[in-house]
Image: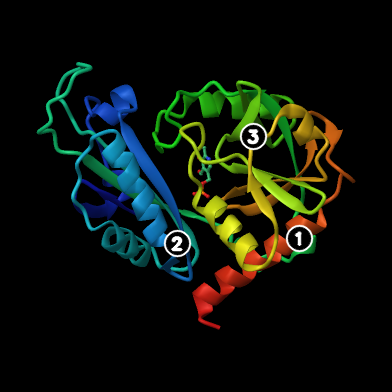
Amino acid sequence: NIVYLKGQFMASEKATVSPFDRGFLFGDSVYEVVPYFRGIGFRLQEHIARLEHSLRAVRIQADTDWAGLMDELVQRNGGGNMSVYLQVTRGDCGSRSHSYDASLRPTVFACCAPVRNFAAVPAEDVVGISAIVTADLRWHRCDIKSTGLLPNILVLQQARDHRADEALLLRDGVLTEGTSCNLFVVRQGVIYTPKRSSDILGGITRELVLGLADANGMQYQEVDIDYDSLMSADEVWISSSTRGVVPVTRVDHSPIGSGNKGPVWARMFELLARYQQQLMTGE
Ligand code: PLP
């Protein structure tokens, strides 16, 4: 298992960071997760653009060839299907102080993890998941992909304690997203999703889903979704880079719609799978 740390590729056992690294001390760092299928980055440029947005927003300057770094890491790990985790911290400040010197050198770390190719799974084999709805405990800049994930961890564990797979987050009476995914609901054939704001992460898969909807004559709207419209929806789905689109068939222990995967989800799942397959094989 080869990782990248501070300019070098090395075995994961050899990778160490200082306890005074601000990523460790303060969560003063941002990250990206990029799926690779058949050794090719899926929507790589979009992920890099989002990483650069996060870096700019927290004023970390790291001039790195991100695509080159990730491509090489995947190759060194044997290529195929995997996801790259990439983290950039503000750097090692040598002591614990909140304020920082702008001359700090960022710490760049990247590693690979196995990922399932969601496009290779037949729609009938996809299993609907369950979710709970709970308060969105996060800060006001959820558009930044910060490694400060304590609220996400706590609410996901709360879901697990309720034997649910995901937590959907409620802020000021409207749903924002899941702990590591965006949210969609379907009513009378129309797809609804919360609009982009600093309350949600601009998901790469979310954009792709809306693009595919547009290109295939499926209606969608970016709107506020409250608890009642979630619970009375015909379908609920979540999306993320490593999971694709996944139907949520139970929320707060109640079935959504028929309690089964819905037809609009099935259509989007096929469109996403076809898009991904075409990109990977050129067919
Ligand atoms: N929302 C949050 C909070 C996330 O952490 C993620 C991804 O991890 C997403 C949404 C989905 O984003 P993407 O489709 O880019 O993976």
Identity, as a three-letter code, of the amino acid under mark 1: Ala
What is the CA distance from the residue labelled 2 to the residue labelled 1? 22 Å
Residue drawn at (25%, 27%) of the image? 22
Q: Is residue 99 above or below residue 43?
A: above
Residue drawn at (60%, 39%) of the image? 194
Which residue lies under the disc numbered 1? 266
Which residue lies under the disc numbered 3? 224
Furthest-right residue in this view: 258
**Residue 171 left/right relative to 3:** right
What is the CA distance from the residue labelled 3 to the residue labelled 1? 24 Å
- Can you tell which mark lies on residue 43? 2
Q: Is residue 1 visible?
A: no
Q: How is the image coloured?
A: rainbow
Of 157 and 100, the residue lying toward us:
100
Name the quadrant containing residue 72. Answer: bottom left
Furthest-top residue in this view: 97
* Place of residue 160 in the rendered image (x, y in percent of width and height, measured from the top left): 68, 29
- Can you tell which mark lies on residue 82? none
Looking at the image, is mark 3 or mark 2 earlier in the sequence? 2
Query: Which secondary structure lies at badge 3?
Result: loop
Of 262 and 86, the residue lying toward us:
262
Q: Nearer the viewer, mark 3 or mark 2?
A: 3
**Residue 28 left/right relative to 278:** left
Identity, as a three-letter code, of the amino acid under mark 2: Arg
Furthest-left residue in this view: 103
Q: Is residue 97 above or below residue 22?
A: above
Q: Is mark 1 within 8 Å of ligand 1?
A: no
* Place of residue 178 in the rendered image (x, y in percent of width and height, measured from the top left): 60, 36
* Place of residue 237 in the rendered image (x, y in percent of width and height, measured from the top left): 70, 46
Mark 1 Cα shell of 10 Å, populated few (<14), some (14-19), many (≥20): some
